[in-house]
Amino acid sequence: MENKIKLITELNKKHSEMFQSQRLERELYLAKHPTNVIVFKCMDGRIHMPTVTQTPLGIMHPFRNIGGKFDLGWPLLNESFDRYVKKAVAKGNRTLVLVTYHYSEGDQHRGCAGFHYDCEESKRFTEEFRKQILRTYGENNGVVFPILVGLETDKDALIFHGENGQIMDVATIKDSDEKNLKTLFGKLYPSMPERILSDLIPLVQGNMRCIKQTTNTGKPLKQMVHGEWILAVGKGFDWLHTPNIAMIVGPYDPNIGEPIQTAANIIKSNMNAKSGQKEFVLLSSAVYSDAAEISRAKERTLYLNRLTQDIIKKNLPDMVGKMHSMAVILNADTMEMHIVK
Ligand SMILES: [Zn+2]
């Protein structure tokens, strides 16, 4: 277990260093591509959008929950999402929202456990959520532009769903030339503002590079099936960059007990699996951006930690003896993690 804690601490150190060294690269990227990009995604440990789009860390703002299931009626999500939109507007920028679902081409059971591996159901649900965003901000509002995107996890390929029902699987695109992609995606999203379209193209190009690498090197089966041993609850997990080690539950669902329980169950079945882990880590986290917020962040991470422990004790008592708990806070400017408890 000590090795696991050490691994988590080292992973954070490595990625906070990387995050800080990418500061200029990130600023340069944002100067060229100012569109605010928000991603709604599954808590599944295999889904990491900066990796599949090969963008510097901190460009995309992720929201995570089981299955990528969200409701803009959730009070905290409603406020938090709107804050990101308004912050971008204040800087003169539009917001591209990637509402995502995921599946595996090779094996249905490598798909989304949050939807019981039912890809059609996950598409239907996430499309409803996309429509809810449109309804909230207004059809053709031109500022908040939500699109439905699938991720096929065997190849790491993105599947874009167009405005008129067409589908664009990035794995099938041959020519990564900007002009060609602009034509393709302009047809897919005829009402997409020019600025957003221009800023979508580098994500597609990054994904084309990623697919090439994944296809060339081949993905080890270990990375394709669930293998998570960290139950992460709260915010600020972008540094948990290594695929497939953590199930991440965001703080947004008012019934947060449900996704926590589902995530704990998946980790439990990973432990039961033949090559599975014997123990797991409960990692709660809260984010702060200046010193004045530290004490509030501490209370948030400690609360989520207590809550998760209570849920596990009540529903999965045999997991208690296999749990090691960590409550941390994360500095948003450096991505450095500090252990609270
Ligand atoms: Zn999933």
Image: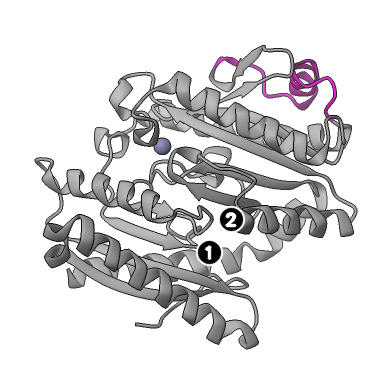
Q: Is residue 187 left or right of residue 303?
A: right
In front: 33, or 192?
A: 192
Residue located 24% across and 60% down the image? 312
Q: Position of residue 251 (x, y in %)?
A: 50, 59
Q: How is the image coloured?
A: one colour
Res. 89 image quadrant: bottom right
Q: Residue furthest left?
A: 274
Residue topped by disc 2: 57
Is the shortest distance between ligand 1 and the CB of mark 1 under 8 Å?
A: no
Q: Is residue 93 above or below residue 7?
A: above
Q: Is residue 193 left or right of residue 133?
A: right
Residues shaded magenta: 172-192
* Element marked by disc 2: loop
Taking the image as drawn, is residue 11 in sight? yes
Q: Amino acid at mark 2?
A: Leu
Q: Residue 175 in magenta?
A: yes
Q: Is residue 338 above or below residue 83?
A: below
Q: Position of residue 102 (x, y in %)?
A: 46, 30
Q: Position of residue 106 (x, y in %)?
A: 33, 19
* Element marked by disc 1: helix
Task: Assess disc 2: are there few (<14), some (14-19) or many (≥20) residues with their C-alpha within 10 Å of its C-alpha.
Answer: many
Residue topped by disc 1: 18
Q: Are marks 2 and 1 in contact (CB under 8 Å)?
A: yes
Q: Position of residue 247 (x, y in %)?
A: 36, 51
Q: Is residue 235 above or below residue 106?
A: below
Q: Is residue 236 left or right of residue 6?
A: right
